C-alpha cells in the first residue's frame, strides 16, 4: 500500500458525508472522499456498491490519489474477493453517466504523481440494454443458460423487447487522460458496452496488472499516446485474464474491433504473462503505424509468455493483406514489430480443462457454439423499387441477420472465480 499524504476512509454501511473521513468516522461516498482529500491521499473503501455523487453512476478523479477497495466494514481486513467493492450502476444510470467512465480520471501536472485504482469490480451489466430472454423474433432467442439476450449496442437499436437498461451508452469502465504514473490492479472490468479501459497517457510509466477483463465490447484495454517524444509513454500490461472481447456491431458480417489489448502509436508496450481467450476478433492488435517513420522505428512493443485460446480471427493482427494480417502465437517469432516474442503459445489440453472450471459454463458453451448468418433479398418488382426506378434511383434490397450470441451479460457472481485460475499466468489470487 502506498504511503500517502493522508489516509481517508469510506464505508457505505457505516459512513456519512458529514463525517471527517477518519477510520472511526468514515465518509459514505468515494466522490466526497476524492473531493475532500489532499493531493497524494490514500482512500480506503469498504465493501458496497458506490455510485458517486447523488448516485450519478460514476466517480470523477481530478487529482493524484490512490483509491483502494476490498475492505471489511470496520477496516480490520482486506479481501477484495470477499468484501466486494463495486461500481455497478443500475438500469436508470444511462441518462446521467453517458459521457463519463465509471472511473473518470483527468489529471496532469506531475510526472511523478500517482493514480492507483486497486480492488474494484466495475460492471455495466445492469445498466446496459439487452434483448429480452423472451424475444418476439425467434432469431434473437438467447443462448441457453445466459442471463440476458444479446447486447443492444450503442447506436444500434434492435427492435425487440429489452431488459435491464433503457439504452446502452458509449461510456467506458475506466476513462480519462493522465500525466504521471498509473497503476490499475486487482480489479474486475466486465460488461463494458464501450471498452474496458480507454485512456490517454500524457507522459509516464503505467502498469496494468492482475485484472480480470470479461465481456467488453470494442477492446478490453486501449491506451493512446498524448506525448510527442518517443519513449516518454510506456504501458506494462501483465498477469491479466482477458476473456470474451466483442466486435463493434452485432451483425455477423460487419466484424470490426473485438480486441484484448491494442498497441497504440507512440506507446512502448510490454505485454506478458497474460491469458487471452475467446476474443471475437483478435487477442492483440498492432495495426496502428505511426506516419512518422522515425518515430515508428523507435517504438518498442513486446509480447512474451502469454497464453491464448479460441481467439476467433487471430492472436495478433498486423497491418497489410487488405483486411489485416492474422497471426497466431506460434508465428510471433517472425513478427519484426515484437522485440520480445518468446514463449507465447496456445493453451494445452490440461490448461483448457483447468481454466474451464472457472468460466461460467453456459457462457463458454454459448461462445464455442455460436453461429451467425446474414442474407440479402432483392425484389425488383416491389412497390418501393418501382417507385425508386420511376424517380431514377437505384433499387435496394433488405437484409436479415441472425446471431446466437453477442456480448450477453456475464454473470457478476462468477467473475472473481478467475483470479488464480492458472498458476503464474493471468490474474493471480489477490494477496
Image (cartoon, rainbow, N blue to C red):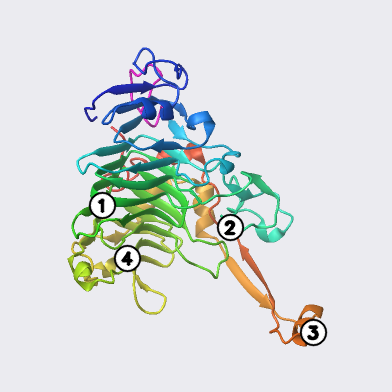
> Is 24 colored magenta in this rendering?
no
Q: Is residue 76 above or below residue 85?
A: above
Pinpoint residue 279: horizontal percent, then vertical percent: 43, 59
| Element type where label 1 sits in the image | strand
Q: Which of pointers 3 and 2 lies earlier in the amino acid sequence?
A: 2
Q: Which of pointers 4 and 2 lies earlier in the amino acid sequence?
A: 2
Q: In which quarter of the image is the C terminus?
A: top left
Residue labelled with disc 1: 235
Q: Residue at point 57% right, 55% down? A: 153
Q: Is 1 on the left or on the right of 133, as rendered?
A: left
- The magenta stretch is 70-83
Pinpoint residue 379: horizontal percent, then vertical percent: 75, 82
Q: Residue reaching furthest front?
A: 109
Q: Is 8 on the left or on the right of 162, as rendered?
A: left
Q: Is residue 366 visible?
A: yes
In this rendering, the count of numbered labels is 4
Label 4 to label 3: alpha-carbon separation: 47 Å
As drawn, the label of residue 155 is 2
The residue nearer to you, when weighing 84 against 236, is: 236
As drawn, the label of residue 381 is 3
> Is 81 colored magenta in this rendering?
yes
Pinpoint residue 357: horizontal percent, then vertical percent: 42, 45
| Element type where label 2 sits in the image | loop
Q: Residue at point 41% right, 62% down? A: 311
Q: Which of pointers 1 and 2 lies earlier in the amino acid sequence?
A: 2
Q: In which quarter of the image is the N terminus?
A: top left
Callout in the foreground (3, 2): 2
Q: Is residue 285 above or below residue 87?
A: below
Callout in the foreground (1, 2): 2
Label 3 to label 1: alpha-carbon separation: 58 Å
Residue labelled with disc 4: 286
Amino acid at each position: 500500500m502506498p504511503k500517502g499524504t493522508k489516509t481517508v476512509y469510506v464505508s457505505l454501511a457505516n459512513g456519512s458525508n458529514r463525517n471527517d473521513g477518519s477510520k472511526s468516522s468514515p465518509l459514505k461516498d468515494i466522490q466526497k472522499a476524492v473531493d475532500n482529500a489532499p493531493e497524494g491521499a490514500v482512500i480506503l473503501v469498504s465493501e458496497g456498491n458506490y455510485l458517486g455523487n447523488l448516485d450519478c453512476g460514476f466517480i470523477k478523479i481530478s487529482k493524484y490519489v490512490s483509491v483502494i477497495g476490498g475492505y471489511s466494514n470496520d477496516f480490520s481486513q482486506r479481501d477484495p474477493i470477499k468484501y466486494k467493492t463495486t461500481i455497478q450502476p443500475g438500469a436508470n444510470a444511462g441518462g446521467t453517466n453517458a459521457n463519463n467512465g465509471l472511473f473518470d480520471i483527468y489529471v496532469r501536472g506531475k510526472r511523478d504523481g500517482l493514480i492507483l485504482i486497486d480492488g474494484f469490480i466495475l460492471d455495466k451489466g445492469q445498466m446496459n440494454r439487452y434483448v429480452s430472454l423472451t424475444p418476439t423474433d425467434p432469431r434473437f432467442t438467447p443462448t441457453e443458460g445466459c442471463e440476458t439476450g444479446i447486447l443492444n449496442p450503442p447506436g444500434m437499436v434492435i427492435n425487440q423487447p429489452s431488459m435491464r437498461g433503457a439504452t446502452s451508452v458509449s461510456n467506458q469502465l475506466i476513462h480519462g487522460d493522465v500525466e504521471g504514473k498509473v497503476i490499475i490492479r486487482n480489479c474486475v472490468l466486465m460488461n463494458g458496452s464501450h471498452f474496458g479501459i480507454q485512456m490517454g497517457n500524457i507522459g509516464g510509466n503505467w502498469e496494468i496488472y492482475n485484472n480480470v477483463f470479461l465481456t467488453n465490447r470494442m477492446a478490453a484495454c486501449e491506451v493512446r499516446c498524448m506525448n510527442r517524444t518517443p519513449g516518454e509513454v510506456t504501458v506494462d500490461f501483465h498477469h491479466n485474464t482477458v476473456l470474451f472481447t466483442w466486435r463493434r456491431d452485432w451483425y455477423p458480417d460487419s466484424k470490426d474491433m473485438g480486441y484484448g489489448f491494442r498497441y497504440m502509436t507512440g506507446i512502448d508496450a510490454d505485454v506478458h504473462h497474460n491469458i487471452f481467450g475467446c476474443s471475437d476478433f483478435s487477442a492483440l492488435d498492432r495495426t496502428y503505424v505511426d506516419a512518422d517513420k522515425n518515430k515508428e522505428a523507435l517504438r518498442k512493443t513486446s509480447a512474451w509468455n502469454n497464453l491464448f485460446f479460441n481467439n476467433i480471427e487471430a492472436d495478433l493482427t498486423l497491418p497489410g493483406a487488405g483486411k489485416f494480417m492474422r497471426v497466431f502465437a506460434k508465428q510471433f517469432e517472425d513478427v519484426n514489430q515484437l522485440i520480445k516474442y518468446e514463449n507465447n503459445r496456445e493453451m494445452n489440453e490440461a490448461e483448457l480443462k483447468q481454466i474451464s472450471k472457472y468460466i461460467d459454463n453456459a457462457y463458454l458453451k454459448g461462445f464455442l457454439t455460436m453461429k451467425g448468418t446474414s442474407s440479402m433479398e432483392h425484389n425488383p418488382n416491389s412497390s418501393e423499387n418501382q417507385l425508386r426506378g420511376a424517380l431514377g434511383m437505384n433499387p435496394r434490397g433488405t437484409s436479415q441477420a441472425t446471431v446466437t450470441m453477442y456480448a450477453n451479460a456475464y454473470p457478476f457472481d462468477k467473475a472473481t472465480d478467475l483470479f488464480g485460475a492458472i498458476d503464474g499466468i493471468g490474474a493471480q489470487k489477490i494477496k
